[in-house]
Amino acid sequence: MTNLRSPLFAVAALVTLAAAAPVMAGDVQTGGIPLGMGGSTTNNSFSASNVAAGVGNQAFQQIHSSQKGAGQGFGMSGYSFPGMPMAGGLTNNTAQANNVAAGVDNSALQQLGLSQRGVRGGVANNNLSALNLSAGVGNFAGQNLFQTQR
């Protein structure tokens, strides 16, 4: 009798796990509990280049940009309970700003205001890469950056 019980317990455990898998997966539609990620991933990318090249040129660039994850507010995407703010999600915000004055007697000025944020209760990867380069004779390259990350 003992030899028969072990395989039966193993089969019963497999059946229980197979039936409970959707519930444990965090899917509200199948009765699971939301795991806080909401299933949404947002990827935002921004690139700006300002170049004054040659002889006696001027370049001016002014930018205001906002990057944020999906589902800001109440129940916009993913799952939320009535009256509760949506939580979770993955947000990847990437920005690149290049400012170059090259040649002879050139000036390049770049002003950038950038706001990067994720979703409340989620994970946010916020990155800014900035390059300010003056090469040659009598050149000026100025870059003003104001960035907020949440």
Image (cartoon, rainbow, N blue to C red):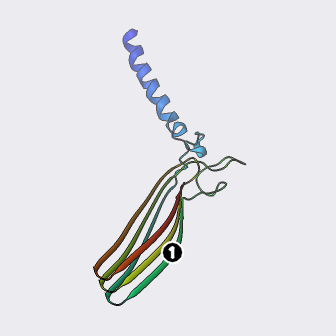
Looking at the rendered image, the quarter that the N terminus falls into is: top left
Give percent across and percent down for residue 95: 43, 65
Give percent across and percent down for residue 16: 49, 29
Give percent across and percent down for residue 23: 55, 38
User: In the displayed image of the protein, which residue is found farthest to the right?
Assistant: 83
Q: Residues within 10 Å of mark 1 (few under 14, many from 20)?
A: few
Q: Quadrant of residue 13?
A: top left
As drawn, is 55 to the left or to the right of 150?
Answer: left
Q: Nearer the viewer, residue 135 or 147?
A: 135
Residue depicted at x 64% and y 49%: 80
Above-or-below relation of 13 to 71: above
Q: Quadrant of residue 139?
A: bottom left
User: In the displayed image of the protein, which residue is found farthest to the front?
Assistant: 138
Residue depicted at x 35% and y 85%: 106
Give percent across and percent down for residue 10: 41, 22
Above-or-below relation of 76 to 140: above
Q: Nearer the viewer, residue 20 or 139?
A: 139
Above-or-below relation of 95 to 86: below
Looking at the rendered image, the quarter that the C terminus falls into is: bottom right
Q: Nearer the viewer, residue 124 or 101?
A: 101
User: In the displayed image of the protein, which residue is found farthest to the bottom?
Assistant: 56
As drawn, is 111 to the left or to the right of 55?
Answer: right
Q: Secondary structure at mark 1?
A: strand
Above-or-below relation of 70 to 121: below
Disc tally is 1
Residue bearing the label numbered 1 = 63
Amino acid at dot 1: Ile
